[in-house]
Image (cartoon, helix red, strand yellow):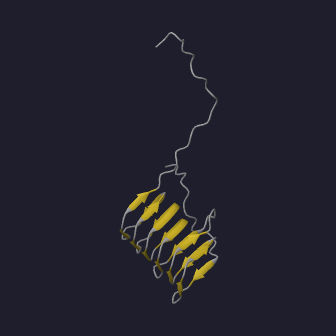
Amino acid sequence: MFNNKEKKVSRSAVMNTLIGAGTTIRGDVTFSGGLHLDGRIEGIVRAEAGSQAVLTVSDKGCIVGEIHVTQAVINGTIKGDIHATEHLELAGQARIEGNVSYKVLEMAAGSQITGKIMHQAEPQRQLTGPEIEPAHVPAHAT
C-alpha cells in the first residue's frame, strides 16, 4: 500500500560476534559486521567507521557507556548515550538512561527512554544542474 523506501535494519545480518550471558567486558569495544550482546559491556561500544555494522542487545544484555553505531536493535538496558547514524529500533523491553540521537527511530510499546531524543537531520544537499548565467541587467537600471 505504501511505498516505503526507508532502509530497515537487516534482522538477518550476519552476527560475527556474540557476547554471552554471564560475560562482562570492562573496556571499549570496536566492531564491524554484527555484534549480539546477551552479557554486559562497561565502556564505549563503537562500530568501525564506514561499516554497516549492526548492534543487537537482547533483553538480557546491558551496556554501561556510550554507543556509536550505524544500526542497532535494543531490547535490553543501556546506561549512556546512543548515537545511531542510520536506524535505531527499541524493542518492548528496552530501557535507555541517556540521550538518543538517531536518523530513523522505531519504538515498540513498553520501551522507555529517560533522556533527550534528538533527530539527526540529513545534511542539506545542493541541487546540481546546468549552470545558469545571471540575467543581464542594463547599467542604467537601478
Q: Residue at x 43, y 65 (%)?
A: 100
Q: Nearer the viewer, residue 116 or 34?
A: 116
Q: Nearer the viewer, residue 26 or 3?
A: 26
- Residue 126 in the image: above or below residue 45: above
Residue 9, position as x, y percentages in the image: 55, 63
Q: In the displayed structure, does residue 121 sit left or right of residue 36? A: left
Q: Nearer the viewer, residue 75 or 116?
A: 116
Q: Quadrant of residue 29?
A: bottom right
- Residue 118 in the image: above or below residue 136: below
Numbered circles on residues, count:
0
- Residue 115 in the image: above or below residue 127: below
Q: Residue at x 53, y 54 (%)?
A: 6
Residue 135, position as x, y percentages in the image: 56, 19
Q: Residue at x 39, y 61 (%)?
A: 117
- The single residue placed furthest to the top in the displayed view is 140
Residue 75, position as x, y percentages in the image: 45, 74
Residue 36, position as x, y percentages in the image: 56, 77
- Residue 120 in the image: above or below residue 21: above
